[in-house]
Amino acid sequence: MSENEGIKLEFTAKQATILSLALGLLVGGFGGFALGTVSASPAERATVTDNSQNTNSDSGSGDSTSLVSLEGIEFKGEPDLGNESAPIKVVEYTEFGCPFCSEWEGYDASSRIPIDRWNVKKNLVQEYVETGEVEFIQKNWPQPRLHPNSIKGHKIANCVYRNANESKYWDYQGQLFDRRAQWMKGGQDNPKQTFRQISNDLGLDTETILSCYNSSNAEEAKEDQNALTRQIGRIGTPTFFIGNREQGFIKISGAQPLSRFREAIQRFQ
């Protein structure tokens, strides 16, 4: 399924649940996709969203009933928001070319996807990160077979993280989502032109960052993917792990609403 083939089906909440379970049984046979339902308030319709290249046996609901271990997954030295000593971690695996990742972050990637209006990331940060209860950690999961330029987005973002202060990293990754339609277009030079413009707009040391980009082999992204694949297997984007080292983590697949994160966080409170 390409990003231009978003599926939006309007049903009652009960019908959407039944449909998602049926789709979940079919997913394994296709091997390259997983579908997740996104539910919000009763006034909002159920939306079926693409969770690209997920080869796990998710049911289609985005729910995970069992806890998983993230042993061997590094948290320190990664882009994060909040206090490192927070008792609960929310670890996101994202892709800057993924429309559902963009929507979850609050940026409009498609008129067919209403998720950006829910402001899930913003509300999650305000409710849990700023209160010191949760540390939000971001990890790389580029999918170049689906979005050919996505690895370039991760390369430039990691160079910003290494060569600027962390707040500038979050500003830059926000612009990658916001200007996704520009740098995701084909052509070898077009992405770099957009990266340069974003850097200039944010007042960064553009030449240093681009020099880092030119010499990068995407080592951070490769490490994130290899470590998680060994521990969990392949995933789609966005995928979240909520919990801590001592108790384990709940896996949430897809651009889910804030209510799903509240449910998961409450298990560790």
Image (tube, helix red, strand yellow):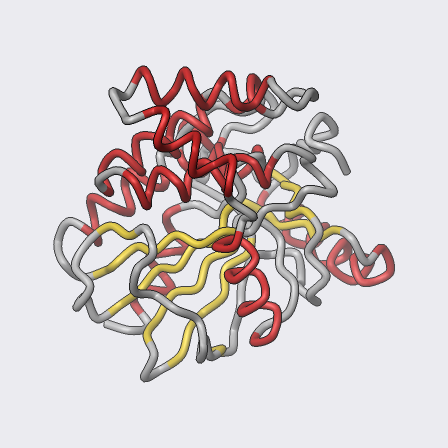
Farthest right residue in view: 29
Q: Quadrant of residue 90?
A: bottom left
> Residue sitting at 68 percent across and 56 percent down?
54
Q: Is residue 150 left or right of residue 39?
A: right
Q: Quadrant of residue 228?
A: bottom right
Q: Return the residue nearer the eye: 235 or 222.
A: 222
> Residue sitting at 65 percent across and 37 percent down?
11
Q: Return the residue nearer the eye: 63 or 199.
A: 199
The N terminus is located in which quarter?
top right
On the image, the x and y values in percent for residue 254 come to: 55, 49
On the image, the x and y values in percent for residue 43 come to: 45, 33
The C terminus is located in which quarter?
bottom left
On the image, the x and y values in percent for residue 86 come to: 19, 66
How many numbered marks does the figure carry?
Answer: 0
> Residue sitting at 44 percent across and 80 percent down?
71
Tell me if I can see residue 133 in this picture: yes
Q: Is residue 59 left or right of residue 40?
A: right
On the image, the x and y values in percent for residue 178 come to: 44, 23
Farthest bottom residue in view: 246
Q: Return the residue nearer the eye: 242 or 216.
A: 216
Q: Quadrant of residue 50?
A: top right
Above or below residue 146? Residue 186 is above
Tell me if I can see residue 9 in this picture: no
